[in-house]
Amino acid sequence: MAPEINLPGPMSLIDNTKGQLVVNPEALKILSAITQPVVVVAIVGLYRTGKSYLMNKLAGKKNGFSLGSTVKSHTKGIWMWCVPHPKKPEHTLVLLDTEGLGDIEKGDNENDSWIFALAILLSSTFVYNSMGTINQQAMDQLYYVTELTHRIRSKSSPDENENEVEDSADFVSFFPDFVWTLRDFSLDLEADGQPLTPDEYLEYSLKLTQGTSEKDKNFNLPRLCIQKFFPKKKCFVFDLPIHRRKLAQLEKLQDEELDPEFVQQVADFCSYIFSNSKTKTLSGGIQVNGPRLESLVLTYVNAISSGDLPCMENAVLALAQIENSAAVQKAIAHYDQQMGQKVQLPAESLQELLDLHRDSEREAIEVFIRSSFKDVDHLFQKELAAQLDKKRDDFCKQNQEASSDRCSALLQVIFSPLEEEVKAGIYSKPGGYRLFIQKLQDLEKKYYEEPRKGIQAEEILQTYLKSKESVTDAILQTDQILTEKEKEIEVERVKAESAQASAKMLQEMQRKNEQMMEQKERSYQEHLKQLTEKMENDRVQLLKEQERTLALKLQEQERLLQEGFQKESRIMKNEIQDLQTKMRRRKACTIS
């Protein structure tokens, strides 16, 4: 269970100091500690429109984000408040309150445009807050949306011929849901005498006008951008909460002192945000947690500071670099842990060690696959494979050294009494050779009976025996009981045994090489198997995203066609009515 992060109050995430956007390191520390998926709600709007009040309500507090009641904007830059999500267990709600747009002290709109763009890039739900009705003035104030294609790139190398307003699929795939909140709304919701819901009112306000004049284009552009970039739209209207003279004390007033209709409207807004705001998700279905949001903030602000455009593709790739590198280390740590628990050196056989390696390697690859994404050209998985191969070779080397050390120590313990007897001349007498050979064979048997000698047991023994051949030959040659013929036969026997032992060691070496080759092939197949499964899952996820984007675009096209059909129907109806009027007039003239 991931720990909850519950900030007692908001803190600056991105400072706006003298026209420069600077990330607050303390806020990044908070984000880095949030391991849960995050739902990010950002609010943007003109200053003095009550944005902070709504965000405090979403945080479940009466105050927190600063409420301004003067002609100066209180919030500067982007402020953050992280609280447990009230309706999604194991999720953190990240609230972003932004600097009021159009502050009279700023003088230009450059920073406003970047604040607007960052709010969209970082959020999963984007709330635009404005006063009164959706009229042309409100649309003119929302001109920032028309600059999005000049402020944000979806791809690092976009097609120069691509019109991103006309082909908005890439933006739709990662843009947040759009919520328009209308404050101090005093009109009846109706059109052509028919009552409208707030959502219907929003759709009605976003209808395009027919015409190709410059005025028509300016009228349509913000509406077209909202329609194209935000297929999922929602609208809330709020009555004036209290008399204007008391608005400055709004955060101090109890709900009972406010207009009941306003209180209910705020409750409905919060309920919708809690129930419908999605987890922040990147292309490929990658859910964003605190560290990932931290990376996005840094990438986007650094791009703006360096004069570049924030690019979604670059941000995801930069995040992938960080997380895939961490995924490699996480996988290696898991491998080390498993091998540390399972391996006891020296292993009795090479195959025993390779089997333990294979099981630990498979689990390590699974850890990497779960933790990685967008591993372009599989560079990080190749790095993991190289590190695992080195780990395997290191274990094999350690196993060989451990076996050699144990076998050498055993030989010292088992054969040292025999060496002392040889030095004492016990076997330098008639019949001493056969006694020496018998004792040597007994000690070899005792050596073979010792457990967990490992893969070097035979080689270390044969190396030891070979080093004592001169001693054996000296005892043989000084034994006066043996005839010359018997001595020749014994020399040949020893040579034959030595050759047989060498052939056996050569076969063992070949078998070890074959086992290593088989292990390398199995390792390759395991990487390939898990990579293929991941690629298939990624393909399915990509198809789902493409289907969702296509469905949203088709829905938008269908709506536009329906609008066009309705307009054509109205035109045709008017023409019929005009024709009927003319016919009635002609008939009246004929009669008269």
Image (spheres, helix red, strand yellow):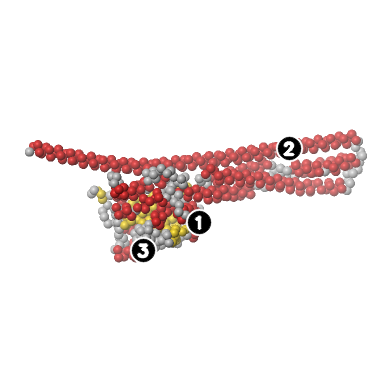
From the image, state whether disc 3 or disc 1 is nearer to you: 3
Q: Which residue occupies 45% across, 49% down? A: 311
Expressed as whole percent of the image width and height from the top left, the position of residue 232 reads 37, 47
In the displayed structure image, the side of residue 421 where residue 261 appears, left or right: left
Looking at the image, which is closer to me, 475 or 216?
A: 216
Q: CA distance from mark 3 to mark 2?
A: 87 Å
Name the quadrant containing residue 129. bottom left
Label 2 Cα neighbours within 10 Å, binned few <14 / some 14-19 / many ≥20: few
Residue 17 visible within the image: yes
> Which mark is on residue 324?
none
Residue matched to label 3 = 72
Q: Which residue occupies 59% across, 50% down? A: 333
Q: Which circle's residue, 3 or 2, is located before the other in the chain?
A: 3
In the displayed structure image, the side of residue 323 where residue 471 appears, left or right: right
Residue matched to label 2 = 506
Q: Identity of the amino acid at label 3?
A: Lys
